[in-house]
Image (cartoon, rainbow, N blue to C red):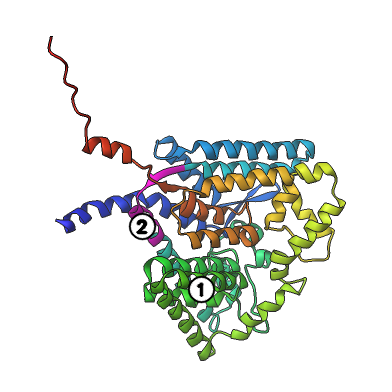
Amino acid sequence: MLTKARALTNPTYKSETRVEVALLVSALFLQRFSLPFQRTFLALDILPVTFILLHQFLSGKLLIQLDRLLWFLAAAFAATLSLALNFNGKMLTSYFLFLALYSLVTLSKPCTLNQYKSTLQAFQFLIVVLSYLAVAQFAAQFIVDGRKLIMFFGILPDVLFGPLRGEMMNTIHPIEGSFLLKSNGLFLAEPSNLSQVTALGILIEVLEFRRPRYLSIMVLGFLTAYSGVGMMILLIFLPLAALRDGRAGLSVLLVVASSAGVFATGLIDSNVFLSRVTEFENTRASGFARFISPLWLTVMHFDTASLQALLVGKGPGTARELASITRWWAANPSSWLKWLYEYGIIGSFLFVCLCASCLRRSRCPGLVLAALILIEVFAAGFLTTWFLTIVITLCTLQSAEPRRVRADFLTRYPRPTPILPAN
């Protein structure tokens, strides 16, 4: 009887997670590609993501959460005020991108725990696919030109790669002191992105599923990226996962043992990972740019900015000008400084409230949610379509079903029929 019930419900879960799978595929496999748009490039992944969510909303499968909508309107008002006080035609792209992307976080649908588990399983499967591609890409460099492999040997037109062509965005990133390139899973914009998503996959696997085969291949994919952001995620959250659940501790040991075994073979140079620690002192390194320079630039901003700039910001898209006023590697910052610089203290406060309202009823495991926040604040950025799509899929789109305790109680114990006095 139980088997029959599972057979009836499992197809439902799979069909209801097709939307989530489509969103994740768009985020993970389309992020490298873009289309020319006026003088800039439009990320290709934003088109299917927007279409899918809009179609689901118009068909009545998604609803707008009132509290999220109110905070979004408040944040949008702050962004509009910043645009009006600092108007420049170049700001419009960043402004409308913000409105388009963050209007999507107001959408949600109730889901059961089993449905959400299906979404996590779909995410894990896609991360395993990317990990296999990353390992194959790393090994293939000993036979073919790694640069041509990343650019798909010219099969796809160069216009689709837009600003990601060649050296932009560190898509083609050599390993320090080697002729080999860091793996990006072929479809991800940077090796750092591969490191981030595989680290998330490892953390989810440790917390929820604990499958040795999945963990082993994701560890290999993570190591071929040679990136520090994912390493920081694992160093912070894997020990917390082990302390939280004893069963997760065994999976954490498997991750450590797998990494040590790969390092022992010499296939992956552990010295490259150890050298990442010094990046916090090197002003030309990504570690300094993501974690240290925002603090220094914030101090400079508060010392030199006007009261208007501090309160409402300098306008959408203006954070990229920070690269011209400092020698630090801070071009187009993707940290919390971007929001503070462009939309000021008022806009930043409203944006934090918007994020809090979107995440407070999330089914996403707490440690995974904290890791996503860490990546968004310091690495991926607030207007990065692919990462925001992952946050929407794993955190904001599926909310816990409303409690029906009162209804169940009344159904089980109906009100007694009153006895009328006889005439």
How far from the left and from the top, in percent, is residue 167? 68, 67
Name which residue lies at 76% across and 64% down. Answer: 293
In depth, the one of 297 and 382 nearer the eye is: 297
The residue type indicated by label 1 comes to Pro
Q: Residue furthest left?
A: 422
Overall secondary structure of the magenta section = helix
Q: Quadrant of the C terminus?
A: top left
Name which residue lies at 77% across and 71% down. Answer: 283
In depth, the one of 14 and 3 nearer the eye is: 3
Residue ID for mark 1: 239
In depth, the one of 165 and 276 nearer the eye is: 276
Res 408 label: none
Q: Nearer the viewer, mark 1 or mark 2?
A: 1
Name which residue lies at 51% across and 35% down. Answer: 66
How far from the left and from the top, in percent, is residue 72? 59, 39
Q: CA distance from mark 1 to mark 2?
A: 26 Å
Query: Vertical placement of 22 versus 131: above or below?
Result: above
| Highlighted range, magenta | 108-121
In depth, the one of 254 and 186 nearer the eye is: 254
Mark 1 closeness class: few <14, some 14–19, many ≥20 residues within 10 Å: some
User: Looking at the rendering, which quadrant does residue 141 occupy?
Assistant: bottom right
Q: Indicate yes or no whether the magenta region holds residue 32.
A: no
The residue type indicated by label 2 comes to Ser
Query: Vertical placement of 186 versus 380: above or below?
Result: below
Residue 106 visible at all: yes
Mark 2 closeness class: few <14, some 14–19, many ≥20 residues within 10 Å: some
Residue ID for mark 2: 118
> Which structural element holds mark 1?
helix
> Which structural element holds mark 2?
helix
Residue 129 visible at all: no
